[in-house]
Amino acid sequence: MSVTSERARLTDLPPAPAPPPFPTGTQRLPMAKALNLGLRRALANDPRTLLMGEDIGRLGGVFRVTDGLFAEFGDDRVVDTPLAESGIVGTAIGLALRGYRPVCEIQFDGFVFPAFDQITTQLSRMHYRSQGRLRLPVVIRIPYGGGIGAIEHHSESPEALFAHTPGLRVVSPSTASDAFTMIQQAIASPDPVIFLEPKGRYWEKGDVDLDAPLPAPHGSPTDLDHARVVRPGTDVTVVAYGPTVATALKAAEAAAADGTSIEVVDLRTISPLDTATVAASVRRTGRCVVVHEAPVLYGTGGEVAARITEECFYHLQAPVLRVGGFHTPYPVAKIEHDYLPGLDRLLDAVDRTLAF
Amino acid sequence: MSTTVPAADGPLTDDGLVQLLTPTGERVGHPEYDRWAADLDGDRLRAMYRDMVLTRRFDNEATSLQRQGELGLWAQSLGQEAAAVGSGHALRPQDHVFPSYREHGVAHVRGLEMTDLLRLFRGVDHGGWDPADHGFHLFTLVIGSHTLHATGYAMGVQRDGLVGTGDPARDTAVVAYFGDGATAQGDVSEALVFASVNQAPVVLFCQNNQFAISEPTTRQARVPLAARAPGFGIPSVRVDGNDVVASYAVTRQALERARSGGGPTFIEAYTYRMGAHTTSDDPTRYRTSEQEEYWRRRDPIERLRVHLERTGELPEVFQAQLAAESDAFGEHIRTTVRAMGHPSPHTMFDHVYATPNAVVDAERAWFTQYEQSFVDHDGRRTAGGHR
Ligand SMILES: Cc1ncc(C[n+]2csc(CCOP(=O)(O)OP(=O)(O)O)c2C)c(N)n1
């Protein structure tokens, strides 16, 4: 029995307008736009790069990071996938085996777990298992972290789970400028990269040099491995990455008013960990606080603290302290600011380390 | 056995939908399903009408509350009331529902305090009701996971000997609701496998509202969704999801099969999400106003209203009472939500484990002391202004 002969046509949408020309020069852009331009450049430069994920096409992604790319590059290059994360990563692995460079978007941090098996048992170790014969240049972009008043599973910080897995590079930009270059470096990397985007910072603006030289060609070393001192100081080193770099900088500002000089190191890369840069800073300051949103227990901060203790034991004036989330599931939005390590909790730790 | 190649517009076809009430409100006959709707007299139909009207009122209130900043987010059920209310009416008290986050109509029929559903969206709770109270599980936000939970729960029901006893007060079924997008998830395929091999008393109720956020069903499947289940050994049916009578009838039959030991059924309710995916979504990016108009003419509430009016089953006094009830309900929702208060930050340490945990206890103690450090002798908050 037919209900009606009329059909609901779901795909007959008017064509999208032509894309704007690629901007040049240094521009002040929100991080989401910087990522968008980084992806756009990667797509334009290499026909074997493709984006895949849920709602990344016409909608431009729920955070609009892929806005306009579907119209410019078509549905072959900007692929709206079925709603299946294991499928997204699993097929990206196959595409990479065939010479493509897939960039997967996971819609929210809490939805990467259906793909966890593909990432940890397959993506991370194909190079190792094949004795270097097979490479998987796959990027997995994940908006992560809290502070946006979201509902359950939309504010997770799963970095340690990936950093604990050998074979994966795990990185997180903290500024628009880094977002623009690091996404291109991640795509150029011959290794799989878990690219964590601090979603609470998507709308924060920063200066981006859009003419910055292109990353080295595929297979060459990239500059995706380096931490950076983003504010010099002499009394305490605060190590942060992604969403907490802004908090650390604010803390440094506030502490400076009280006469304390904080040096802020942005890790940029969680795995591999640039211990050298952090250690050099701690040798100068003698004190170290690590801050991240993820729970402290078994988190990235523990690794940093252990390495710094090993490397800088005789330079340390105080134990390395950690500030982060608690050992609870991410709480409801109304109290997430009590869970997240804010300015006060960070300054409290700075005071404690200075009190030793 | 031959395989038929589906039409290119497979999932979009409305061929073969079970329909008992046309978009213009006409009751049409159906050789198989008429008998499953035979008990729907004027009273039952009016009850369904009332439930749909109140569900829509609830949904509209929640949408406005979100616009006013009282809720962080809202997932509307606008347009999907018939599938929810029709299927909900087919349930028995002992049945158990595993809902998606959009099954507000089912929650209403199950008798939940509807404002409890809003606690999650207001950010004061991760799920503010006791699933045991009305046989209605918490909302699951990871798409598709709960179809496995429903199947496992049904396997438990089966082990408990509550299937096929012939006692209508004991025989139990389980229903999982999920979207068309969810059918792409591995978990849903695994639920079909487990349900089938165990002949679990579960009804897999797929609300095909044509979209998974921006993606039309054609991005998830090439065949009508109901066509997949038989490959797993599960019978399936496609129903006009905007027809509350047909939704009731097909669900009733499926539940009866489950309760009597006949195993699982897959239902595809063909409907349309008339609102946005959630209040953060912009549907103009991926659909046309013509399409919305096409579906507006198939409004599930309107078609039952026309039918009841035409058959003289909708007296004005009932309409007036319902309008008043709906207004009072709206008022109740607004005042209750606004009065929900702010959870104490200390609650975040509660219920992480069922037994004491040294790490959580230490963190709670540290947090309490830390909070205290901001309070002066008069009990006022002092510093901490940085946050
Ligand atoms: C595993 C997982 N991936 C992604 C999401 C983000 N997300 C939330 S709802 C949704 C679309 C769901 O579509 P459908 O299953 O058709 O249900 P509908 O919302 O249309 O009722 C997506 C992709 C999620 N919640 N869970």
Image (spheres, rainbow, N blue to C red):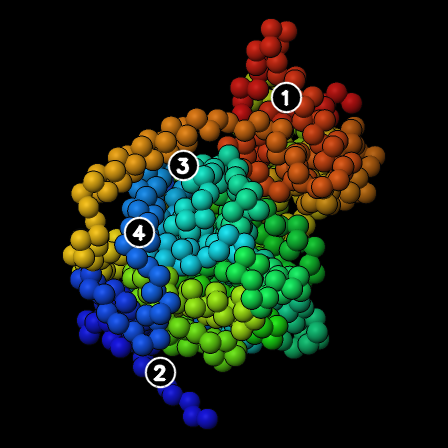
Residue A336 or B116: which is nearer the viewer?
Answer: B116
Q: Are marks 2 and 1 on the same chain?
A: yes
Left or right: residue B152 versus residue B275 is: right
Earlier in the chain: of badge 2 and badge 1, it is 2
Q: Residues within 10 Å of mark 3 (few under 14, many from 20)?
A: many
Question: Which residue is depicted at the point 25% across and 38% down?
Answer: B321
Q: Which chain letter goes with mark 1?
A: B
Q: Which chain letter goes with mark 4?
A: B
Q: Are marks 1 and 4 on the same chain?
A: yes
Residue B196 or A119: which is nearer the viewer?
Answer: B196
The answer to whether residue B273 is seen in the rendering is no
Q: Amino acid at mark 1?
A: Glu
Q: Mark 2 or mark 4, which is nearer to you?
A: 4
- Residue ID for mark 2: B6
Q: Amino acid at mark 4?
A: Asp
| Alpha-carbon span between mark 2 and mark 1 | 63 Å
| Alpha-carbon span between mark 3 and mark 2 | 43 Å
Q: Which mark is residue B43?
A: 4
- Residue ID for mark 3: B71
Question: Which residue is depicted at the point 66% across and 38% down?
Answer: B351
Residue B44 x, y percent position in the rendering? 33, 53
- Residue ID for mark 1: B371
Q: Are marks 3 and 4 on the same chain?
A: yes
The answer to whether residue B332 is seen in the rendering is yes
Q: Residues within 10 Å of mark 2 (few under 14, many from 20)?
A: few
Confirm if mark 2 falls within 8 A of ligand 1: no
Earlier in the chain: of badge 3 and badge 1, it is 3
Q: Residue furthest left?
A: B310
Q: Mark 3 or mark 1, which is nearer to you?
A: 3
Q: Quadrant of residue B270?
A: bottom left
